[in-house]
Image (cartoon, rainbow, N blue to C red):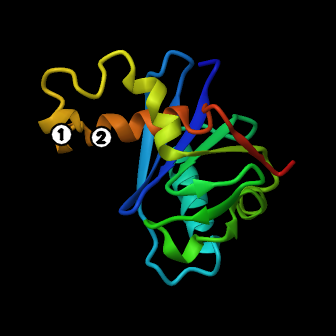
Amino acid sequence: MTGLTVGVDVGGSKVLAVLADAEGAVHAEARHATPPHEDAPGVVVADTVAGAIDDLAREAGRALDGLPVGVGLPGMLDRDGVLAVSPNLPSASGADMAAVLAARLGGRAVVLANDADAAAPGRAPRGWGAPGRGRRGGGGARDAGRRDRCVAARGGRSAGPRLAGR
């Protein structure tokens, strides 16, 4: 398997990590519960992301060192990797997630993006309002898993990615 990437979607209820190829096919995935709101600024979130990536490596049966990592985070992320405001992760609001994630992941480069920005390119082929996409075109709960996998697989591929550790 070549051209693999690690993508992580950090949400209000779960952290989903996937190992995907360039075509977006998911080869392995791992889930963790999003940590409770008692988080030193972003540290517990970063620990959970790292744990999900470790579980992903076990699920994939291979080391993931050296593979690109993209992380989609909920909330307003500035160009320096600071999660300015995050209603879903209030204790991580104001945290320098670029620095915290880079430190927790052994200094490897991590591309950060707002989770909705990371998901948008994957939604384009079917569209938010396509038939069967839920009431008012909102996607519907049954489509949430597909959106989450898209965010994870494309985490960081947005108009304004932030490169952690640089």
Residue nearest the observer in this picture, 27 or 85: 85
Q: Contact, CB < 8 Å: mark 1 with mark 2? A: yes
> Is residue 158 shown above or below 85?
above
| Residue extending farthest right | 166
Q: Residue at x 56, y 80 (%)?
A: 39
- The residue that disc 2 covers is 145
- The x and y percentages for residue 34 are 43, 66
Total tally of numbered discs in the picture: 2
- The residue that disc 1 covers is 142
Label 1 crowd bin: few (<14), some (14–19), many (20+), radius 10 Å = few
Q: Residue at x 20, y 32 (%)?
A: 137
Left or right side of 148 for 81:
right
- The x and y percentages for residue 68 are 69, 35
> Is residue 157 shown above or below 7?
above
Left or right side of 67 for 124:
left
Taking the image as drawn, is residue 165 in sight? yes
Q: Residue at x 28, y 28 (%)?
A: 128
**SS under mark 1:** helix
Q: Residue at x 63, y 81 (%)?
A: 40
**SS under mark 2:** helix
- The x and y percentages for residue 22 are 57, 18
> Is residue 144 shown above or below 86?
above
* Amino acid type, residue under disc 2 in the picture: Gly
Taking the image as drawn, is residue 18 in sight? no
* Amino acid type, residue under disc 1 in the picture: Arg
- The x and y percentages for residue 70 are 62, 40
Q: Quadrant for the N terminus, please.
A: top right
Left or right side of 166 for 131:
left
